[in-house]
Image (cartoon, helix red, strand yellow):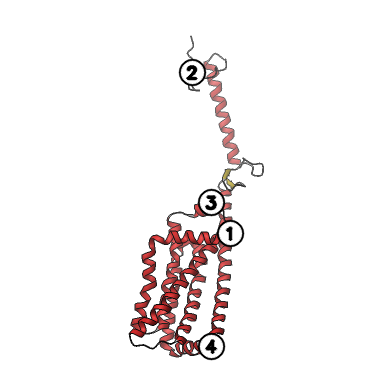
Amino acid sequence: MRDCWKTARLDGLLLWPYKKAILLALLLPIAFAAINRSLLTGVSFAMCFAAMTTGYPFFLAEKNRMERLYAMLPVRKSAVVAGRYIGVLLLGVAALGISLAAQPLVLRAFGEKVSAADVAGAAVAGALLFALYTVFQLPGYYRFGFLRGRIFMYIPVAGFLATLLLLSRAPAVSLFFAQTVGGSPAPFVALALALVAGMYAASLACSIQVVKNKALEWERQIDKNGFYCAGSGSPARRGDSPAQPALPQEADAKRTQRQTRGKVTARRQAANGGLPSAPAEKGQSPNHKPFLY
C-alpha cells in the first residue's frame, strides 16, 4: 500500500506545474451552478470537468517518456496502476467537496433554497457520475495511450450532456434525488459507495491486466528483434545465454567476421615474410606495419 501512495505522490508532483488549470476546472462549475440555479446540474458539471483532467498524467507521462522511469522503480506494475487510481479518486473527492461546499452558498446568495436533502442527493449523484466516467477512461488510456485514446477524454462530456438532457426532460429525477435520497440518505449513500467500490475494483483489475499484457507484448517484440530480457531486467543479446541461442543470421554474421579477421591476419603475415606480426608496443596502434629492410 505504501508503494501505491508513493506512485500517487509522483503523479501529484507531475501535475503540480498545472495546478492553476486544475484549480480553474474545479472552480468554474460554481459559476455554472449560479447560472442554471441548480445544485444537481452544477455538481454534474463539476464531475465532468474533474473527469476530463484525469488524462493529464497519461499525457505528461507519454510526452516525457516516463515509461522508462516507471519500469525502473522498485515497485510492481499493479502498485503503479493503483497509485494512479488513488490520485484520480482524490481528485474526484476534492471536486465533489468543493462543489458541495461552495455551490449551495452561491445559490443561497442568489435567493435559491438549498436543503440538506438537495446536498445529499447531489453528493450521491456526483459520486456515481464521476465513477461512471473514470472507470471507462482509465483502462482506455492504459490500453491506447493518451494520444491514441483521446476519445476517452470526451466520455464525461457525453455523460454530462445526457444528464443535462435527462434533467431538462424529466424534472422528476431531480425531485427523486432530493426527496428520496435526502429523506433517508444512509441506505442510498451506502449503496452508492458499494457501487462505486465495485466499479473501481473491476476497472482497476482491467487496467492492471492491460498493463501486464502490454509488458508481455513488449518483451515478445524485443525477443523478436534479437534481444531478450535478462533476469535483472536489462536487455541483452541473444546468444549470450544458453537459454537464448543465437539466431541464424547472427551466426552467419559472426562467421563472416571470423573469416574477415583470418584474411587480414594472412595478409599481414605475407607482408612480413610469412612470419607472424610482432605484438604492438605500448602506445603503438595494433594495425601498425613494421618497416621491412
The amino acid type of the residue labelled 2 equals: Lys
Q: Residues within 10 Å of mark 2 (few under 14, many from 20)?
A: few
The amino acid type of the residue labelled 4 equals: Ser
Label 1 – label 4 distance at C-alpha: 43 Å
Label 2 – label 3 distance at C-alpha: 48 Å
Res 213 visible: no
Front position among marks 4 and 3 = 4
Which residue lies under the disc numbered 1?
212
Q: Position of residue 186 (x, y in %)?
A: 55, 84
Which numbered dot is residue 72? Answer: 3
Q: Secondary structure at mark 2?
A: loop
Are circles 1 and 4 on residues that touch, CB within 8 Å? no
Which residue lies under the disc numbered 4?
184
Q: Position of residue 22 (x, y in %)?
A: 39, 67
Which numbered dot is residue 289? Answer: 2
Q: Nearer the viewer, residue 160 or 45?
A: 45
- Classify the position of the N terminus by image quarter: bottom right
Label 1 – label 2 distance at C-alpha: 57 Å
Which numbered dot is residue 56? Answer: none
Please report whichever mark, 2 or 4, sits nearer to the chain's N-terminal start.
Answer: 4
Q: Is 47 positioned to the left or the right of 238 in the image?
A: left
